[in-house]
Image (cartoon, helix red, strand yellow):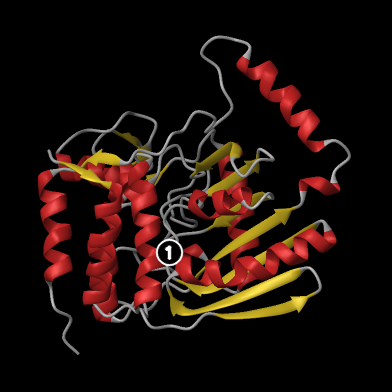
Amino acid sequence: MPKISVKEIRNISKTALMQHGALDWISEEVADAVAVSESVGNRICGLYYLESYCEQLLSGRVDGQASPDVQLVRPGSVYVNADDGFAQPAFSKGLTEVLKIAKKNGIASMSVGRAHTCTSLGYFTKKIAEAGFLGLGLTNASPIVAPPGGKSRIIGTNPIAFSVPDGTGGVAMQFDQSTTTVALGKITMAKAAGKSIPEGWALDEDGKPTTDPEEALKGTLVSAGGYKGWGFGLMAEILVAGMTGGRISKNVAPLKARDGKPHNLGQFYIIIDPESGASFYNRLEELTALISSEEGTRMPGQYTVPQTEVDVPDGLWSLAISLSKAKHSE
């Protein structure tokens, strides 16, 4: 298994996207998200997704030349129309405007609509925190979760991410998690590797627990904490679909399928200026000290250190190289 620099991953990913029809600046935005995911060990949202991006650029499920349109719909609300393009450039286009509003008002929201899947939601909320604001992000996905006690797929894994600034340009805390026990990618990777999955991750078509990833993919995933996770998944579904105008999960085709309609998903963000609080950083410092005082405990994401080189499976890296050399044909 070769050790590859994150810089090289970024460059190869950008080249692959451009070779399949994406504009330079759009490829740069998406490739950065791929590289950052790899740097923190999140392969599901990294190189694992590159082939799908390239295939869907060719099939038309995502427009690599879309021009995001930023609109101020209310004094505290920004809407970005991704125009069936990637989520990363749409977010980037709207971020500067929404941060200005949050600084002025103390709080603001940004809805990104008509977008491709954003993969790692924490990639976006981290950018908000690094700019000095609290960032809460939500999104939905293709249906794979049934209501507790049911068998019909209604919502997706519907991730939620939350990033907290440390006051010095860094991140004091961050979590980025699906509202299911595990992300769907964990199931598909287990199937590809020919491995079983732990009981409690998924149910088969009959609503019974299964350790077979193939049966899980025919059935449903389990909400984290049962009714509690289901509630958070529904919260994400309502806010995202309602505020961005994106499709509800039930109407979204499998995200990695080569052919089909554009994803038309949404991402919804709430941005808060901590300086609008009474004593934000004092309380954050107090809480962090309490949590860190016990050996083996930490704030979520507190000691995450992005790597400059990562191990990449031979087959996956060979595929990335091949994609970077494939010539897009009109």
Extreme-bottom residue of the structure: 330
Residue 321 visible in rendering: yes
Q: Is residue 138 left or right of residue 280?
A: left
Quadrant occupied by the N terminus: top left
Q: Relative to 6, does residue 280 appear above or below in the rendering?
A: above
What is the x, y in percent for residue 212?
Answer: 23, 37
Q: Nearer the viewer, residue 73 or 208?
A: 73
Give the residue number, with chain letter if any, for mark 1. Answer: 117
Q: How many marks?
A: 1
Residue at 57 percent of width and 51 percent of height: 125
Q: Quadrant of residue 307?
A: top left
Residue 2 or residue 148, whichever sits in front = 2
**Drawn side of residue 173 relative to residue 132, left or right:** left
Image point 43% across, 83% down: which residue?
Answer: 66
- Quick check: 277 left or right of 285? right
Q: List x then y, in percent, for residue 186.
A: 32, 42
Q: Secondary structure at mark 1?
A: loop
Q: In the image, is residue 234 above or below residue 80?
A: above
Image quadrant containing the C terminus: bottom left
Residue 216, quarter of the rendered image:
top left
Q: Position of residue 138 (x, y in %)?
A: 58, 55
Q: Looking at the picture, which amino acid does disc 1 mark?
A: Thr
Mark 1 surroundings within 10 Å by alpha-carbon count, few (fewer than 14), some (14 through 19), many (20 or more): many
Toward the top, the furthest residue is: 295
Q: Measuring from the top left, give residue 301's x and y in whole percent.
A: 52, 33
Q: Does residue 206 show up?
A: no
Q: Residue at x 27, y 70 (%)?
A: 17
Pick the residue in front: 132 or 91: 132
Q: Is residue 10 above or below residue 82?
A: above
Q: Residue furthest front?
A: 168
